[in-house]
Image (tube, rainbow, N blue to C red):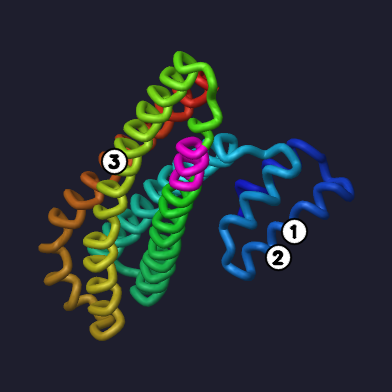
Amino acid sequence: MVAEVMIARKWFGAGPRCRWLLMALLAASSVGCQKTYYTVLEKVGVEKRDLLSSRVERAKESQQAAQEEFRDALEEFQAVTAHDGGELEDRYERLRDAYEQSEERAREVSERIEKIDSVAEALFDEWERELDQYEDASLRRSSNERLQDTRREVKELLAVMHKAEQSLDPVLRKLNDRVLYLKHNLNAAALAGLDATLPELERDVTRLVSEMQRSISQADRFIEQLNKNG
């Protein structure tokens, strides 16, 4: 609900209205009712379009953070395979921590992509219904064209985001294998087998970072286009 908190503070500061809004959103969220959730926001002037833009921005930030977390995990693994003295256990613990942080970030990326899909569908359903309220056929046609364009833009954005998301799990599985291997074989002799796997992991992380960057760029273009037509 971070995006909603940011919107609430932007509109109302940190006063009583902001606290009331956050309490209402928490109540709606706790019962799992998205319709009520969006209705609460609309009653205080926060439209689904605003929320869509905010959620895309938050998803983009998660992907940027994921890039860094996975780079850090790779660096920790490189440090393990380059071990030339010192406490191997310390290096293992740092790799384990980096893996756990990457896993948490990957989960956050997935959750935020799902939230984009949710609010986009709610926006499109509402937009579709409201087309019937037009009396001016020309305005209705123009609005419907914009609806179809926005649907296409969201579909393209989600496709790119999901592709980037799919690059996370294979790297996580490989990192988990290496963390487990070190846990079970915490000695310098075990590093020889790990060293041979380093190039493959480096390629996978490079691919992941590239996919994430493509998704981030797509998100920037989407937000710019949404704001232009808002």
Residue 144 placement (x, y as % from top left): 41, 26
Frontmost residue, 130 versus 79: 130
| Mark 1 lies on residue | 24
What residue do we see at 38% from left, 23% from top?
A: 145
Q: Quadrant of residue 158?
A: top left
| Mark 3 lies on residue | 160
Is residue 185 depicted above or below 15 in this figure?
below
Query: Which residues, given as a range, are shown in magenta?
Result: 120-129
Nearer the observer: mark 3 or 1; the answer is 1
Is residue 141 depicted above or below 180 in this figure?
above
| Mark 2 lies on residue | 27
Residue reaching furthest to the front = 135
Residue 82 seen: no
Is residue 131 depicted above or below 87 in this figure?
above
Confirm or deny contact between disc 1 and disc 2 (CB under 8 A).
yes
Magenta stretch: dominant SS?
Answer: helix
What residue do we see at 30% from left, 82% from top?
A: 183
What residue do we see at 62% from left, 70% from top?
A: 31
Residue 143 placement (x, y as % from top left): 46, 23
Residue 15 seen: yes
Local crowd size for mark 1, using a 10 Å CA cut-off: few (<14), some (14–19), many (≥20): some
| Magenta span contains residue 83 | no
Frontmost residue, 87 versus 16: 16
